[in-house]
């Protein structure tokens, strides 16, 4: 199971985007994520107010491991995998 999430930068304390409208609701609940629709977007996203390092630590405790990371403009994206 691959899971993607992103944040605006490592220096930011949040919010961190952690999923879209198709994400696992139980995982989003575990992360304490809130579902929102930003003005002008035609999709919903889940976010938390935690910094990315907090979210990564929570996901690691559930068995997820980072397999790659990249920067896209001012956005950082991590790809995680759960065995």
Image (tube, rainbow, N blue to C red):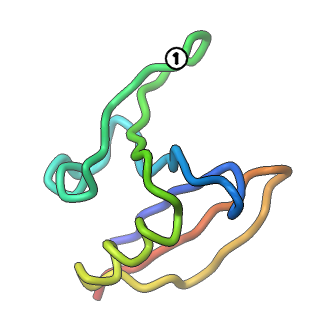
Q: Nearer the viewer, residue 14 or 41?
A: 14
Picture residue at 73% right of the left edge, 52% below the top: 75
User: In the picture provided, is 77 more to the left or to the right than 56?
Assistant: right
Q: Position of residue 53 (x, y in %)?
A: 51, 71
Image quadrant for the C terminus? bottom left
Picture residue at 40% right of the left edge, 79% below the top: 81
Eyeballing the image, is 63 above or below 8?
below
Q: Residues within 10 Å of mark 1 (few under 14, many from 20)?
A: few
Q: Which of 54 and 4 is in front in this view?
A: 54
Q: Position of residue 15 (x, y in %)?
A: 52, 44
Q: Mark 1 points at which residue?
A: 42
Picture residue at 78% right of the left edge, 63% below the top: 71
Q: Where is residue 22 in the image (x, y as percent from the top left)?
A: 31, 41
Label 1 residue SS: loop
- Please identify the quarter of the rendering in which residue 50 is found: bottom left
User: In the picture provided, is 34 more to the left or to the right than 79?
Assistant: left
Most distant residue in the top direction: 40
- Please identify the quarter of the rendering in which residue 77 is found: bottom right
Image quadrant for the N terminus? bottom left
Q: Position of residue 52 (x, y in %)?
A: 53, 63
Eyeballing the image, is 22 above or below 3?
above
Eyeballing the image, is 72 above or below 3?
above
User: In the picture provided, is 35 more to the left or to the right than 73?
Assistant: left
Most distant residue in the right direction: 73
Picture residue at 42% right of the left edge, 42% below the top: 47
């Amino acid at each position: 199971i691959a899971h993607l999430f992103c944040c605006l930068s490592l220096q930011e304390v949040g919010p961190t985007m952690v999923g879209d409208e198709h994400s696992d609701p139980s995982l989003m609940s575990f992360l304490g994520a809130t579902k929102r629709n930003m003005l002008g977007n035609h999709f919903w996203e889940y976010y938390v107010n935690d910094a990315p390092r907090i979210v990564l630590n929570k996901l690691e405790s559930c068995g997820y491991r980072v397999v790659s990371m990249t920067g896209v403009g001012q956005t950082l994206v991590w790809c995680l995998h759960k065995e």
